[in-house]
Image (spheres, helix red, strand yellow):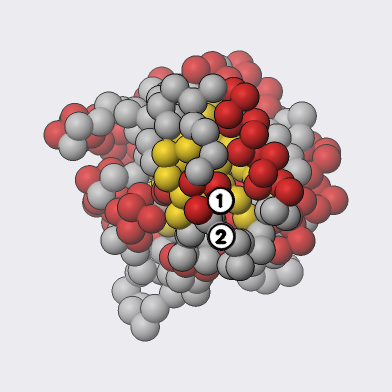
Amino acid sequence: MIVAMQVGATEEQIDAVISAMGEAGVDVHRTTGEFQTILAGVGPTAGLDLTKFEMLPGVLHVHRISAPYKLAGRAWRPEGTVVEFRNGAAIGGEKVAVIAGPCAVENREQIFAIAACVKAAGGEFLRGGAFKPRSSPYSFQGLGIPGLELMREAADANGLCVVSEVMEIAQIEPMLPLVDCFQVGARNMQNFNLLRELGQVRKPILLKRGIAATVEELLLSSEYILSGGNYEVILCERGIRTYETSTRNTMDISAIPVLKKLSHLPVVGDPSHGTGRRDMVPAMAKAAVAAGADALIIEIHPNADKAVSDAAQTLFLDQFEKLVAELRVLAQAVGRTL
Ligand code: PEP
Ligand code: MN
């Protein structure tokens, strides 16, 4: 259920509603917007008489949420969520954020060169995997925590935030001091134990769409994190597996406006995994911004052909710089900045 408080409702009135909802056995999640407080009640609301809540002082209206996801739905935060990071970076505001970096952290020289390039291009986030989910157990599996330490150093030297993938619960704690945002990869979108644990963390989570997941399944996965009280979830469209073989995945651009409509959560476009092809990345990056993406996540490498993972979809640094300059013009045309 959603309880929208009147503009100007007092803290006492809000507290009284929260208590009444608690007594009815529902978990209350509060969002305090610029003008209005909205309370989401999650739990056994089916048999509840909602008029009882409608009568409480300060309540504007009460309604049931018919969608299976409750906290991810736009009704809870109609104005949208802006996830804030260090150095003034944010995802979900007017500015389209740029997250870029290698598929995998490989060595010091590589990650420092990339960090400097991301900064110079005006990006805010350095991405890079230290724990890599690889199709083959014989492929490079990532440098682990030492790789993350290198990335943290490179990011700090350039005033950037760090985004890196967490693959299992045991990695959360050692990663916590090193990352600004945990990425949950496509293969783990339905690792519900991991998602629940990330609900207890107080750091943003970038949740990628599974390779065969529907939009509703993605939103339900985000609900695992949100219901734990971690409200800083960022959704990512990274392409899905279809019958089409000319690209690595089929980037579902339409999922971006669909997610923006259904949910208040920010949405990121990943044209690198979305296409798997360097020559297609710029076009899909532009399409994602035009479709309303709040950020892009792009794989880049000074020696892209030699990248240890995802080389074929990785941009050279000069290609990335050119793309960001073009995106800046495009962003303006769709009422954003970049
Ligand atoms: C990645 O970002 O490098 C990655 C492995 O992404 P995905 O989970 O989308 O395949
Ligand atoms: Mn990759």
Task: Tell me the residue at 49%/74% (across/down).
Answer: 212
Task: Tell me the residue at 73%/40% (across/down).
Answer: 201
Task: Tell me the residue at 62%/55% (across/down).
Answer: 42
Q: Which residue is mark 2?
A: 49
With 309 as the anchor, is 130 left or right in this view? right
* Residue type at numbered disc 1: Lys
In front: 140, or 48? 48
**Secondary structure category for the residue under label 2:** loop
User: In the figure, 45 relative to 178: above or below?
Assistant: below
User: In the figure, 68 relative to 128: above or below?
Assistant: below
Tell me the quadrant of the picture where the C terminus can be found.
top left
- Cα separation between marks 1 and 2: 6 Å
User: In the figure, 272 relative to 296: above or below?
Assistant: below
Q: Does any portion of residue 18 appear in the rendered image? A: yes
For the residues labelled 1 and 2, say whether their Cβ atoms are less than 8 Å apart: yes
The picture places residue 12, in percent across and down from the top left corner, at: 62, 24
Q: Which residue is mark 1?
A: 52
Q: Residues within 10 Å of mark 2 (few under 14, many from 20)?
A: few
- Asked where in the image residue 141 lies, by quadrant, the reply is bottom right
* Residue type at numbered disc 2: Asp
The picture places residue 261, in percent across and down from the top left corner, at: 33, 52
The picture places residue 337, in percent across and down from the top left corner, at: 27, 27
